[in-house]
Image (spheres, coloured by chain):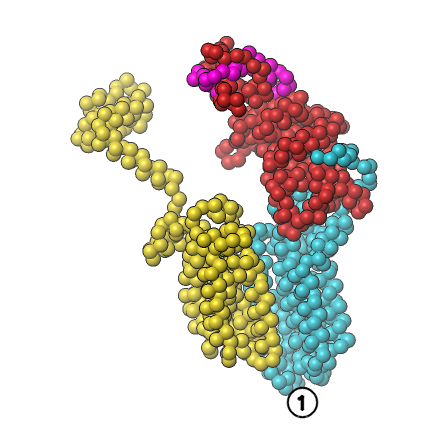
Amino acid sequence: MSSWHVEDRDLRRWLAHNTALATSVSIEQHLVSCDGCIDRVGALARQDSALDAEMEHGWERVRDAVELHRPSWLERGLTTVGLPAHEAQLVAAARAFRGPLLVAVLVVLVFAELAGQFGQARGEFFFLLVAPLLPSAAVAFGYDPDLEPALEQELCTPYSPARLVVLRTIAVLTLAIPVAVLLGLVLPGPISFLWLLPAAGFVAADLALSTWISPLRGVAVITGVWSVTVWVTAYHSSTDAALHGAYPSVYLVLVVVSLAVFARRAGHVRGAYPGRSSR
Amino acid sequence: MSDTVALHAVGRRYGRTWAVRDVEVELSDGVIGLLGPNGAGKTSLLRVLATSLAPTTGRVSIFGWDAEVAEQRTEIRRRLGYLPQELGFPRGFTAFAFVDYVAVLKEWTDRTARHAEVRRVLDLVDLGAISTKRIRALSGGQRRRLALAQALLGQPRLLVLDEPTTGVDPEQRAGLRAVLAEAARTSVIVLSTHQTEDVAALCERVIVLDTGMVRYDGTVHDLVAAASGRVWVGDDPDPRAIASWRIGSGRYRNIADRAPSGAEAVEPTLEDAYLLLRAEAAHPERITT
Amino acid sequence: MTTATVTAPRTVRSRNPLWTLTGYEIRRLVRNPLFLVVVGFNAYAIYDTTSRVIFEADELGSIPAWLLGGMGMIIFCWLTQSTWRSAEALDVTPTAMPVRTTALCLTAVVPFGCAVLSLVAILVVRAPQGSWTYGVFDGADRAAVQVSQIVLPALGGPLLGVAIGRWTRQVWVGPAAELLIAGWVLLVEGLAFSYPDSQPVLLMRLFAPFALFTGSGDRGDFVETWRGSPAAFLAWQICLCALAVVAALLYQADPLLRRRLIHALFVLVPLTAGCYALAVTGGLQHAVTVVPGFAPRPS
């Protein structure tokens, strides 16, 4: 190894960006392999407070680039629409936004739509049975306590569980509804969009039920009730009878009542404080 | 057939990181304690012993059977009880049902005998009275005892226990020590723990692991003796001490080669000896002889 | 802790716990509330449909298929996934994973048995409107249709559930797979109604674990018999069941077993493809419509 080392004077000028290009390149080349000179760079920099701050800032940026969490596409989207970055991080952490689950929900919805479009009466029945339940199932995966490994730590923070639940619900619906509407254009007749009414009702109902039982159990209850309803109405009337007559009003009432119940019992969400409201 | 468990130059690598390296030990009947800091490789070593993990290098011979060979590995597992560091439980099972299920997997096909054995091990860990309770309704300590119960099925010849006393209350820990001490008459028991008092109470032999390698393998008595004359209790912490901490009486316990002023020498504990060993390994230049 | 005996009582242990484990899993299955609901609902639905006149044979076959087969797939998937949390302790027992998987596969005999009972019930108490409800199928083809629609799905669904449960951890995978299969079957069935003679539709219709072979008008005024060979389709379903078992057993199989299973695949896959080819090329070459009181005619 060469015995030549950079002099302090040259190092100071280099730190102040005051050296010719050739000299800078020469110094940088030397620094790559000389620990002693690198140590002297630090010592010299600390003698100049402005320079020291600049170097410190540089190291901070290096650490940020290496250590900081990289926002996902969903977080970037949420921050774009105005959600603070830290809240976007909380929302996007839900299992509902894992790629495989989202793809599975989408694929099932596509198959249900195709079955409804081409599958005659049975296909329509299948579509009506499945499609309205998908949004609430996806929402339930967003905040079911059994799926959260760090639930206990989350509950012991000041952040409102109800707020987190609402934000995640909105995020899931924001992803699901446009896709559902686009796909609904494939299906002929009012069934294309009328199914969104029970879907909305079930999402709201699951939110309300989650103040008593876990969201996935709530979805199981809703699935049972809806299956019986669709089957009985199809048996006695027509396949899409559950979307006509008095039923749309029932779904609207379900939305309003469920949201009211959720608002009243928000303190019980995720078992935040069993037996008492956290307010 | 052999009566010993032997690890020959055993190593285990995850990617580029060696969790365990060049471990050469021979274990016989009795309780062997495995100590070491977090990340020392204790769990990896125990998993290799329990045939849950294959070593990257070296050979594992358990009672004469080679763990690499499938049929011999099955023979080993017929004589093995394993308590992992973290054991989950299937949903919807009661305590009895879970241990019963494991008993079936351990080839207890006769129903009457199996149920008698399940009750025996549940009584051993003091869960007999609540065996019909759902696991999700059990406390953390009770679940740990349940996990231990399944390891005790069939009085295994080799018991591998990874932190068996985590979350267990002192009274239960004392009971567990009695159970293990009795079992050690006819079994090889390897347990890893952070509780040095468990090792001191139970083990004649201790292995200290650090950064995947064996730093000490010998009797507890010899390890403690190495710290003799180097443990002091005084009114102030000694800044030159290898380790120094405040004790319940408000005084300070120091591990140092020379007595701090006003301090008196005390009998070393296994914990003192362990800390001294760790410090010597980390900073050999600080140790004066 | 108590001073209960540390020493285990001397007892006989079998080297083959397969049957004990199978019995254990069967007990777990029959105590599963969802399975009980499915079996109960299946019985009620069959009773309800057999208590009235049926216009078309496929009306009955679908019920056990969707319930015992489809829901059975989900239930078995969850049963299989339920023990993964304890995997670290269970995997070091002397009972190897393939044995545990075999026990779960053998447990499928329960829904299979329920489906056989369903078939018997349907045969005994059904009230067909007339001989045309089976389209133009004769005795052998008719039997093949009944077995392939009522019995085989109740076996294949659970076996597929075990395979999925072995290879995945997420609870939503089973229901998603079931919905995909259901959607596909309904889609291709609907296409068959619209294009009964179409070759691509035929290929799609029979490329499924379940297929209908007849369709009817809403008022039962005609029954359309579709293309394809029911007997070959039944063979195709059996091959699919075998493939599901092989896929399940491959999980954590030791090298020797894995080699044997892959050798079995070298036989099974061509066999399955052959059965599919026979199903597609055999049977009716054109869809035939049967109207009561008239001779059968091409659709």
Q: Residue at x 19, y 32 (%)?
A: A17
For chain A, what colour was chosen? yellow
Locate the N terminus of chain A by quadrant. Answer: top left
| In the rendered image, the vertical position of residue A89 relative to residue A261, given as above or below | above
Q: Residue at x 68, y 74 (%)?
A: C60
Which residue position holds label 1? Answer: C294
Q: Is residue C198 magenta?
A: no
| Residue B255 shows in this picture | no
For chain C, what colour was chosen? cyan
Q: Nearer the viewer, residue B12 or B157?
A: B157
Task: Name the amino acid type tagged 1.
Answer: Phe
Where in the figure is residue B73, as x and y percent of width and height? Answer: 69, 36
Q: Nearer the viewer, residue C198 or A238?
A: A238
Where in the figure is residue B49, as x and y percent of width and height? Answer: 64, 32
Q: Is residue B221 magenta?
A: yes
Task: Identify by letter the chain in red.
Answer: B
Q: Residue at x 74, y 51 (%)?
A: C24
Magenta stretch bounds: B215-244
Where in the figure is residue C103, as x and y percent of width and height? Answer: 72, 52
Q: Name the secondary structure under disc 1.
A: loop
